[in-house]
Amino acid sequence: QVQLVESGGGLVQAGGSLRLSCAASGSSFRINAMGWYRQAPGKQRELVATMTRGGTTNYADSVKGRFTISRDNAKNTVYLQMNSLKSEDTAVYYCNVLVFGPPYDYWGQGTQVTVSS
């Protein structure tokens, strides 16, 4: 079992910045990839950014150049620095962790990010 605790969401004006954090505990030694997904009202959940244990990153095209994912393996924590926020970034952001053997996805409870224009 892996438990995830997210923090850092909130309300920000367009052009502003926010930083999300997600700390994993429990069977954290099994963690492979960590990342962030988001879901806007009436839309499907979509990938924002992921990072493998080795540091390989993957970003949605819509956030490239504005968002940066990072992780501290020693603290089992993943971060999402979000700059130049746009109204279309408004969504609930979910932390995601993929563990090894057998592969399994864990999800955080979600944190609301609202960007006002």
Image (cartoon, rainbow, N blue to C red):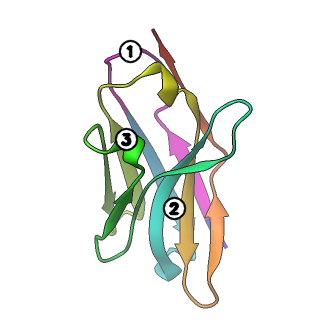
Name the disc covering residue 63, or none: 3
Q: Which three-letter amino acid code belongs to the residue tagged 1?
A: Ala
Residue 112 seen from this side: no
Tag 2: residue type? Ala
Disc 3, SS:
helix
Mark 1 residue crowding within 10 angstroms, few (<14) / some (14–19) / many (20+): some
Q: In the image, what residue occupies the spot 47% across and 58% down?
A: 35
User: Pointer 1: what residue?
Assistant: 14
> Mark 2 = which residue?
24
Marks 1 and 2, how far apart at CA: 30 Å
Which residue is the extreme one toward the bottom?
A: 101
Residue 25 coordinates in the image, percent (x, y): 54, 65
- SS at mark 1 in the image: loop
Q: Earlier in the sequence, mark 1 or mark 2?
A: 1
Residue 13: image quadrant is top left
For the residues labelled 3 and 2, the Cα–Cα distance comes to 24 Å
Amino acid type of disc 3?
Val
Q: Position of residue 73 (x, y in %)?
A: 34, 68
Local packing at callout 2 (Cα closer than 10 Å; few below 14, some 14-19, many 20+) is many
**Residue 71 - label:** none
The image shows residue 98 at horizontal and vertical percentages of: 55, 72
Q: Secondary structure at mark 2?
A: strand
Lower sequence index among marks 3 and 1: 1
Task: Say left or right for 35 vs 42.
Answer: left
Residue at the image position 43 percent from the left and 40 percent from the top: 20
Q: Is residue 9 magenta?
A: yes
First to last magenta residue range: 3-18
